Each structure stands twice: as C-alpha cells, then as structure tokens.
C-alpha cells in the first residue's frame, strides 16, 4: 500500500483483507460493510466507503458494474499487465482475470478490423453468466414452471 502513496490505515487494511478472502468474487460497498460489521472493531460505514474509494483511486482495486448499476470491487492482481482480459458475470459479483497475451493480441486485431481504436492500456471484458447465476436462474425457472403446473392442477 505504501508504494501507492497510501498510508496503511486500519480501514484500508481490513478492506483489502476482506477482498482477498472474497476472491474471485467482487464485493460492493454495502456487502463489504456487512462483512466488516461482524468484526469486533468494525469501521463506520463512511470509513469503509472512503477506504474503498482511496484504494480504487490508488489503482489497487478494479471496479466493475453489476446489476442496477452497483459498483463491485476486486483487488487488482500485482502482475496484471496491459495484455489482460476479464470474464465478468452479468451480476457483477464475479470477475476472473485472463492473462493471455495471444488472446489479447487477437482481440485487439479483431477490434481494429471492425473500426475500433485501441489504446495502449486497453483491457477486454467478456460479460457472461457464472455457473452460480446459471444455477439460480435454472432453479428459478423450475420453481416458476412447477408453480404454474401446480396451480393449473388445482384450478
């Protein structure tokens, strides 16, 4: 933390620790506060928000958007170079880093062919649905389908 010009405050340290434990899941500020509020010396909500913002501004965290515009944060891997991409779930709660230079070069070339200007620090994000969300969706469809069927039988 010191190399990025930030003092290692208690709030910043415990926020980073919670994000490390959550990986590869991302957390939003309210989830972070709920996790930290169970600890003995939990920081105030404002301290959690400030710590997340400070860490993100210093480049230690990556931010992704989830459902309904919620911002989710994850620790930026130290070895992350400019040739990385991410797999991101639609819900925003899961982010997996892909460090494949050949894939990055291919995506860059494809984007260029399609008329996109690629800057030096471009990162590619592939938004998809994680297995957990697929399972929840499947269970929801089964419940809905089962519910309809049972209503039809009783009507």
Image: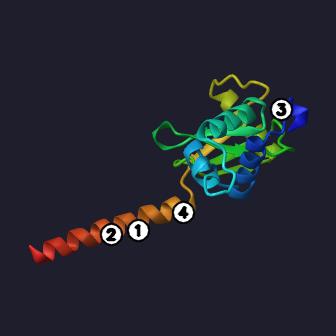
The residue to which callout 1 is attached is 139
Residue at image x 56%, y 50%?
A: 128
Query: In this rendering, which labeled residue sits more in front, label 1 or label 3?
Result: 3
Query: In this rendering, which labeled residue sits more in front, label 4 or label 3?
Result: 3
Residue at image x 69%, y 22%?
A: 117
Query: Residue 89: x percent and y percent?
Result: 57, 50
* Quadrant of residue 60 within the rendered picture: top right
Q: Is residue 65 left or right of residue 63?
A: left
Question: From mark 4 to mark 1, how far is it between C-alphas?
Answer: 11 Å
Which of the colour schemes (rainbow, by chain, secondary structure, one colour) is used? rainbow
Query: Residue 63: x percent and y percent?
Result: 65, 38
Residue 86 visible in the picture: yes
Assess disc 4: are there few (<14), some (14-19) or many (≥20) residues with their C-alpha within 10 Å of its C-alpha.
few
The residue to which callout 4 is attached is 132
Query: In this rendering, which labeled residue sits more in front, label 2 or label 3?
Result: 3
Assess disc 3: are there few (<14), some (14-19) or many (≥20) residues with their C-alpha within 10 Å of its C-alpha.
few
Residue extending furthest right?
Answer: 3
Return the disc, 2 or 3, that comes first in the chain's sequence: 3
Q: Which mark is residue 143?
A: 2
């Amino acid at each position: 933390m010191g190399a990025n010009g930030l003092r290692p405050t208690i709030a910043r340290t415990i926020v980073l620790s919670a994000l490390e434990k959550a990986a590869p899941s991302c957390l939003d500020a309210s989830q972070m506060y709920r996790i930290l509020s169970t600890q003995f010396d939990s920081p105030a909500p404002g301290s959690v928000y400030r710590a997340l913002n400070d860490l993100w501004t210093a480049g230690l965290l990556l931010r992704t958007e989830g459902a309904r515009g919620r911002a989710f944060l994850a620790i930026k891997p130290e070895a992350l170079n400019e040739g990385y991409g991410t797999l991101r779930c639609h819900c925003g709660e899961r982010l997996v880093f892909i460090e494949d230079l050949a894939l990055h070069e291919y995506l860059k070339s494809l984007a260029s062919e399609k008329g996109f200007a690629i800057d030096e620090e471009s990162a590619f994000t592939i938004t998809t649905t994680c297995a957990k969300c697929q399972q929840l969706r499947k269970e929801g469809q089964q419940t809905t389908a089962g519910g309809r069927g049972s209503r039809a039988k009783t009507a």
